Amino acid sequence: MTALDLTPLAQLTSVGCQFLADCAGLTALDLTPLAHLSSVPHGFLRGCTGLTALDLTPLAQLTSVGYYFLFRCCRLKSLDLTPLAHLTSVGQLFLALCSGLKVVDLTPLAHLTRLPHGFLHDCRRLTALDLTPLARLTGVDSRFLFGCHGLTALDLTPFARLTHFDNTSWFLRDCSGLTALDLTPLAHLHRVL
C-alpha cells in the first residue's frame, strides 16, 4: 500500500494501539482527518519506513502519545514538532530509530517533566540538539540519546535542576561524535541508578 485516504475517518476521537503501524509502503500521509484526537496509544505510525515527510499540524490537540510514536520512520529527514506543543507526556522510544532525522527542535516539548526510555534513541544523523526547552524535567529514563553518534556537542545546562536519573543505562552510549562533555550542570544529582 503506497497511499491511504483517511477522509472517511474524520469523526474519529480515538484509535487503538498500532494504528497504521508497519505501513512501510506509504511515502506520504495526510493526517487532517485525525484532527479530533487528543491522544494516541502505543505504536502510532510505528515502522512506516517509507514516509519521507509528515505534517503533524492536524494532531495539534494531542496531550499525550504512547510508546513507539513514529518509531523507525527512518526516511524522515526533518519533522516539525510545533503542533505537539500541548503534549505533557510521551511514551517510550519517542522518535527512536528515526535515523534520517538531521534536525529536531524540542521547543514544542517544553511541558514535558520526564523523558522516557529511548528518547530519540539512534537518531544517528543529528549533529546538534538544543536541550534548553527541557528545563522543566524532573526525570530522565534509560537510553537517553543512545546511538546518536552524529552529535558533536551537547549542552547539559538545562538539566541543572535534576536531582536524580531514574535509570542511566546506556545514557549517551555510542555518542562517539562527542569530543567533550561538561558534566557541571549535573552537580545537583544525588542519585544515579
Image (tube, rainbow, N blue to C red):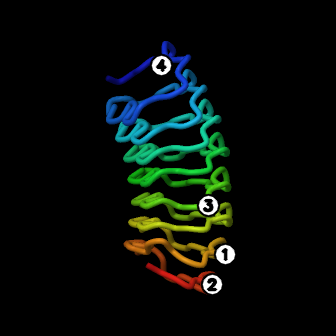
Q: Earlier in the sequence, mark 4 or mark 2?
A: 4
The answer to whether one can see residue 125 in this image is no
| Residue highlighted by disc 2 | 188
Q: Earlier in the sequence, mark 3 or mark 4?
A: 4
On residue 161, which mark appears? Answer: 1
Q: Earlier in the sequence, mark 4 or mark 1?
A: 4
| Mark in front: 3 vs 4 | 3
Q: Residue at x 67, y 66 (%)?
A: 135
Q: Is residue 148 above or below residue 6?
A: below
Whether the residues at callouts 2 and 1 have beta carbons within 8 Å, the answer is: yes
Classify the position of the N terminus by image quarter.
Answer: top left
Q: Earlier in the sequence, mark 2 or mark 3?
A: 3
| Residue highlighted by disc 3 | 113
Whether the residues at callouts 4 and 2 have beta carbons within 8 Å, the answer is: no
Q: Circle 4 — which element?
A: loop
Which image quarter: residue 130?
bottom right
- How many residues crowd around disc 1 within 10 Å: few (fewer than 14), some, or many (20 or more)? some
Give the amino acid type for the residue marked by disc 2 in the picture: His
| Inter-mark Cα distance, 4 to 1 | 43 Å
Q: Earlier in the sequence, mark 3 or mark 1?
A: 3
| Inter-mark Cα distance, 3 to 4 | 33 Å
Classify the position of the C terminus by image quarter.
Answer: bottom left
